[in-house]
Each structure stands twice: as C-alpha cells, then as structure tokens.
Amino acid sequence: MTSDADQTPPTNPSESGANVPVPPVVDLSPAVLKSAYNAFKKRWKLTRLDYDSRIGRSPLSSGHSSAIVGITAPKEFPKAVWEELVKQGRLKHAGSGLYSMPQ
C-alpha cells in the first residue's frame, strides 16, 4: 500500500488529466504576413467597391468618401497575424474585431 506522500505529481500537465489548453504555434514569417496583408487589401478593395456601387450611392455625384470604417479580417489567418500587422503599422484597429487600412 502506498501513501499519497510517496507519489510524486506528474511533471507533464496532460498526464494529470487536466485539460490545459496549449496555444498553437503561429507562423509570423514575412511570407505569411505579406500573404495576409495582400488578402486583407483585396477584401478591403472589394468591400469598398461593393459599397460604392450600390443603387442610390454614386461616388461621382456625392463627393463623399466611403463610409466603410473597418472590415473583419479574412479567417484564413489567425488573429496573431493581424495583431502583428497592427503592431507593424500596416493595419489599424477599427474596434469590435474590425481592422482598417491606415490613412
């Protein structure tokens, strides 16, 4: 018979049965950042074109700039990639999980 004092706790958290979430490793290489930035720029451009081409909204006659404040980032890339692009100054937070192009 062994007592509780003789047993050593497991060194690996997964051995104890606890569900400890392990953060995934995110690739922040320049190639991934460039690809994510290009995907964002493409979505930004298409969103603005879609908004500007609506019926009743003529960019030629109104003289107003686009009312698009921000868009959600493409889901093909993790949030850490978007945060890194914000940190680099290539994107900016628009609030509520939205990002925009810096002016």
Image (spheres, rainbow, N blue to C red):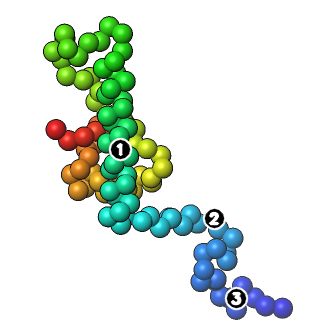
Where residue 32 sits, quadrant-wise, is bottom left
Task: Please name the residue that numbered disc 2 is placed on.
Answer: 19
The spot of residue 92 in percent (x, y) is: 25, 44
The spot of residue 99 in percent (x, y) is: 32, 40
Query: Of the residues shown, which amino acid type is indicated by label 2?
Result: Asn
Residue 6 in the figure: left or right of residue 74:
right
Residue 58 in the figure: left or right of residue 82:
left
Query: Of the residues shown, which amino acid type is indicated by label 3?
Result: Gln
Q: Residue at x 33, y 26 (%)?
A: 49
SS class, disc 2: loop
Q: Earlier in the sequence, mark 3 or mark 1?
A: 3
Instruction: Report how far apart the C-alphas of labels 3 and 1 lie in the structure.
Output: 54 Å
Q: Residue at x 64, y 83 (%)?
A: 9
Q: Of discs 1 and 2, which sits in the foreground?
A: 1
Which quarter of the rendering shows the N terminus? Answer: bottom right
* Residue 97 appears in the rendering: no
Where residue 96 sits, quadrant-wise, is top left
Q: As displayed, is residue 91 above or below residue 19? A: above
**Res. 40 mark:** 1
Q: Nearer the viewer, residue 14 or 54?
A: 54
* Residue 4 appears in the rendering: yes
Residue furthest to the top in view is: 56
